[in-house]
Image (tube, rainbow, N blue to C red):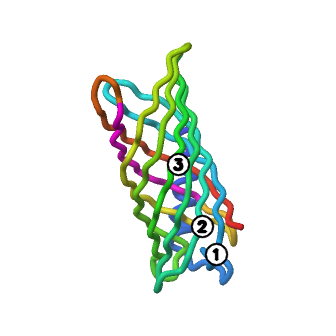
Amino acid sequence: MRLHLVRLGLAAIATATAPPSEAAGISPGAFELGVSGALTSAGETTTASVALRTAWFLPIGGSWIAPGADLAYVHVREHDAVDALANLAWAHRVGSTAAYPFVAITGGVRQDWQGSFREARFPVGASVGLRVFVGADAALLAEYRALRITGDPVADFSEHHLRLGASIFL
């Protein structure tokens, strides 16, 4: 398993540093549809989640602004949560490579439930990451996201996510 992850990482680095084909990369008005997974650390609990993500890329100078949304599901033992988040990202291509580092702000609502108990919370935060195109309309994604969860009945708390994913661009 580790060898497979190392090979995947080396392939992504080679792809990012090699000159892309003319068609590879973000084009004006491109729509991203992706799936990602995350390892989340909140307090002393580590969980896993899956998310669907969308973004619409608009050119601004030599960069891109991308409003988007994420819909994520988390399950930990008997606890479930769904996040609906809005994002606003800024991305810029690194030279003539297939790599697009980005920064984003995010916020939204989280619905937590355990049995019949339900509670709404409000995550807000920021992220930094990298999209690397592996074809004309496909990219791999790595993202670090820090969220402050507000509206908790006991106390607000912080979460840290490392998201890895894949996207297609339409």
Residue with the mark numbered 2: 56
Residue range highlighted in magenta: 140-151
Label 2 is placed on what type of residue? Trp
Q: Secondary structure at mark 2?
A: strand
- Magenta segment's dominant SS is strand
Q: Position of residue 129 (x, y in %)?
A: 44, 59
Label 3 is placed on what type of residue? Leu
From the image, state whether disc 3 or disc 1 is nearer to you. Answer: 1
| Residue 142 belongs to magenta span | yes
Residue with the mark numbered 3: 164
Residue with the mark numbered 1: 29
Earlier residue among tags 3 and 1: 1
What residue lies at 58% left-to-right and 50% top-to-bottom?
165
- Give the spatial CA distance, label 3 vs label 2: 19 Å
Identify the disc placed on residue 66: none
Q: Position of residue 109 (x, y in %)?
A: 48, 41
Relative to 157, say whether 57 is above or below: below
From the image, state whether disc 3 or disc 2 is nearer to you. Answer: 2
Relative to 96, say whether 124 is above or below: above
Q: Secondary structure at mark 3?
A: strand
Cβ atoms under marks 2 and 1 closer than 8 Å: yes
